[in-house]
Amino acid sequence: MSYYIHKAHNVSILLYHYVCPAKYRRVIFDDSVDKALIQTCKEISKRYDINIMEIGTDGEHVHFLIQTVPMLAPTEVVRIIKSITAKEIYRLCPMVKKKLWGGNIWSVGYFVSTVGKNNNENQIKNYVCNQGKEYTKLYQGQLKLFE
C-alpha cells in the first residue's frame, strides 16, 4: 500500500500507472527478462525517489504502479525507468538484441495516469498484477525507502 512521503517542506502521496510498450511491440518479456527488469527496478527505487509498487508484463508491454515525490515530473520518472532498464536488460539478456534492431528496447511513447489513494489504487494494483494471458505476479511489495 502507498503511504505519505514526508520531505523537508512537503508531504505527498502521488501514485501513477505507467504502461511502456516494447519497441515494435515485439514480445521480449520472458522469465529471464522479467527477472532483469525486476532487479533493475529495485535498484532504481534505492537510488531515486521512485517507489515501484507493482510490475506486470504482458509479453510486449509492461505496467508499473509507481509512487513518487512532487519534485519528479511523470516524464522524468518514465525517462529514468526506460533508460536504465534498457541498458541493464541488454547487458543481462543479450538475446533480446536478436528480437530488436536499432538499439532500443522501449517504444518512444508511453501511457501515464494518476491513481487515487483509495478504491482506484486497489483496482489499478489488481489490474497490473493480473497482466498477461496467465496470472503472473512479478513483483509485489513496497520498498520503504522514503522514511
Image: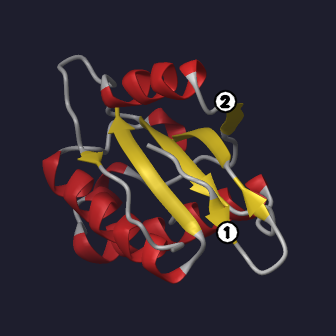
Please rate how many residues cluster around mark 2, counting C-alpha atoms within 10 Å: few if below 14, some from 14 to 19, many from 20: some
Q: Which of pointers 2 and 1 indicates the residue nearer the eye?
A: 1
In the rendered picture of this protein, how many numbered marks are placed on residues? 2
Residue at image location 54% in from the left, 29% down from the top: 121
Residue at image location 20% in from the left, 58% down from the top: 35
Circle 2 — which element? loop
Q: Residue furthest right?
A: 9
Q: Residue 59 appears at what percent x and percent y?
A: 32, 33
Q: Quadrant of residue 37?
A: bottom left
Nearest the viewer among 93 and 78 is: 78
Q: Residue 3 appears at what percent x and percent y?
A: 54, 52
CA gap, disc 2 to disc 1?
18 Å
Please rate how many residues cluster around mark 1, counting C-alpha atoms within 10 Å: few if below 14, some from 14 to 19, many from 20: few
Counting residues from the start of the chain, the first of labels 2 and 1 encountered is: 1
Amino acid type, label 1 = His
Circle 1 — which element? strand
| Residue receiving disc 2 | 116
Q: Quadrant of residue 137?
A: top left
Whether residue 13 sits left or right of residue 41 in the image: it is right
| Residue receiving disc 1 | 6
Q: Which mark is on residue 99?
A: none
Q: Residue 77 appears at what percent x and percent y?
A: 67, 61
Whether residue 45 sits left or right of residue 69 in the image: it is left
Q: Residue 145 appears at what percent x and percent y?
A: 46, 73
Residue 126 visible in the snapshot? yes
Nearest the viewer among 109 and 96 is: 109
Residue at image location 62% in from the left, 55% down from the top: 4
Whether residue 34 sits left or right of residue 118 in the image: it is left
Amino acid type, label 2 = Gly
Nearest the viewer among 113 and 25 is: 113
Residue 58 visible in the snapshot? no
